[in-house]
Image (spheres, rainbow, N blue to C red):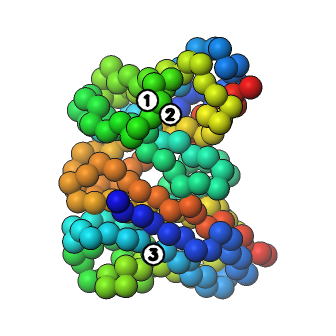
Amino acid sequence: ETGVTQTPRHLVMGMTNKKSLKCEQHLGHNAMYWYKQSAKKPLELMFVYSLEERVENNSVPSRFSPECPNSSHLFLHLHTLQPEDSALYLCASSQEGRGEKLFFGSGTQLSVL
Amino acid sequence: AQTVTQSQPEMSVQEAETVTLSCTYDTSESDYYLFWYKQPPSRQMILVIRQEAYKQQNATENRFSVNFQKAAKSFSLKISDSQLGDAAMYFCAYKQGGSEKLVFGKGTKLTVNP
């Protein structure tokens, strides 16, 4: 048990589907993150929530919609995705502060057909 | 914008031997933090070691140590007495002080041969 749980572990969806990724942290942290990991590319920061407010939106297309209802839960709502959105989506949490380390979940492997 | 470069896409080491993974970064800031993360096949990123830029002393965690050369903007990871369980992707990452953004390199795949 890592403290950060992501569901589902795998997801296959068509381009017209709507789905959601879920992340839950049990560490008492107050910041949560979504990262995208594509093959042969660095991890890309998508969104950051600090104290349940979005503080970073890294030029992510609107077909990705984050939601942070409380400090323990983070969602990524997906709709009308493209095949190039296929990737591993990683959630992380941290205690807001200078240089605090991130704790990651095991990710959702997303395939868009 | 800050960038992190890992010039070795793949490395291999014999069990019980020592290996060094390279990382360079580019920043004009003086207040920042550097990290090495490990990602095994389970996909979960795990922190290996962390270094504050203002500290001259190199961080050490058991068999893992870093060689932090601030002027050269270099942050290499040394793994001593390599074990089969060390096989994974290793990512170098940078975080500016006061920012929530962690910038990663492309990673180095480490293979440990028995």
Q: What residue type is labelled 2?
A: Thr
Mark in front: 1 vs 3: 3
**In the shown orientation, is residue B59 left or right of residue A30?**
right
Same subunit: marks 1 and 3: no
- Residue A2 position within the rendered picture, expressed as x and y whole percent measured from the top left: 49, 43
In the depicted view, which residue is nearer to us: B36 or A3? Answer: B36
**Mark 2 highlights which residue?**
A5
> Dot 1 corresponds to which residue?
A24
Dot 3: few (<14), some (14–19), or many (≥20) neighbours within 10 Å? many
Which label was assigned to residue B24?
A: 3
Question: Pointer 2 and pointer 1: residues touching (CB < 8 Å)?
Answer: yes
- Looking at the rendered structure, whether the residues under marks 2 and 3 are on a common chain is answered as no
Whole-number angstrom distance, CA of label 2 to CA of label 3: 32 Å
| B34 lies left or right of A16 | left
Task: State the separation of the CA atoms marked 1 and 3.
Answer: 33 Å
Q: Do the residues labelled 1 and 3 touch (CB within 8 Å)?
A: no
Q: In this view, does B84 lie above or below A100?
A: below
What secondary structure is found at the residue carrying circle 2?
Answer: strand
